[in-house]
Amino acid sequence: MEICGEDFGKDEIRMGKFVIKETKTGIKFDLKAGNGEIIATSEVYSGEAACRNGIQSVINNAPIANLEDQTVEGFEEQKHPKFEVYVDKAGEFRFRLKAKNGEIIATSEGYKAKASCFNGIESVRKNAPDAPIETAE
């Protein structure tokens, strides 16, 4: 199979993955695309079990989440689970994924273009369901 001009065997196609890592204040996860870019990150959890529950929540909610574009005047509020697209204080587009209970379970980096933010959401939808879970070294 050819992807971006590179030839990959069937087993060599790079998939996304969840990476669990320790921080100074607890433990968190990043969802990385096949190219290694972080497409979503979690809050800091107190323990690994809670972090893994957060990952499972992303896996369950991302594929079915509604899209709420809060950058549009008079936007229609969507039911949870949902991706909320908004503009941060620096003027960049971001998204946050909220679970069925309204809790934020993953957030994005800032994007200069709204289209890039939407691409990030699609990447989470595509990568999360089958992403393996690894622990950072």
Image (cartoon, rainbow, N blue to C red):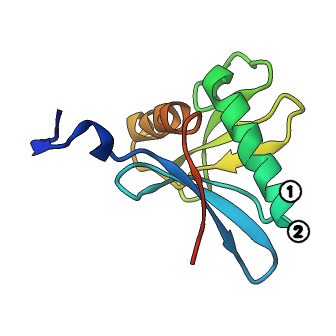
Residue 51 drawn at (x, y percent): 79, 57
Relative to 58, residue 44 above or below: below
Callout 1–callout 2 Cβ contact below 8 Å: yes
Residue that protrudes farthest toward the bottom in the picture:
24
Residue 79 drawn at (x, y percent): 79, 18
The residue depicted at 58 percent of the width and 25 percent of the height is 72
The residue depicted at 52 percent of the width and 35 percent of the height is 121
Pick whichever, 91 or 97, lies toward us.
97
Label 2 element class:
loop
Relative to 110, residue 83 above or below: above
Query: Which residue is denoted by mark 1 in the rendering?
Result: 50
User: Taking 73 as reference, is 103 left or right?
Assistant: right
Residue 66 drawn at (x, y percent): 67, 20
Query: Which residue is denoted by mark 2 in the rendering?
Result: 46
**Kind of residue indicated by mark 2:** Ser
Query: Which quadrant of the structure image shows residue 47?
Result: bottom right
The residue depicted at 59 percent of the width and 33 percent of the height is 129
**Kind of residue indicated by mark 1:** Ala
Residue 112 drawn at (x, y percent): 41, 50
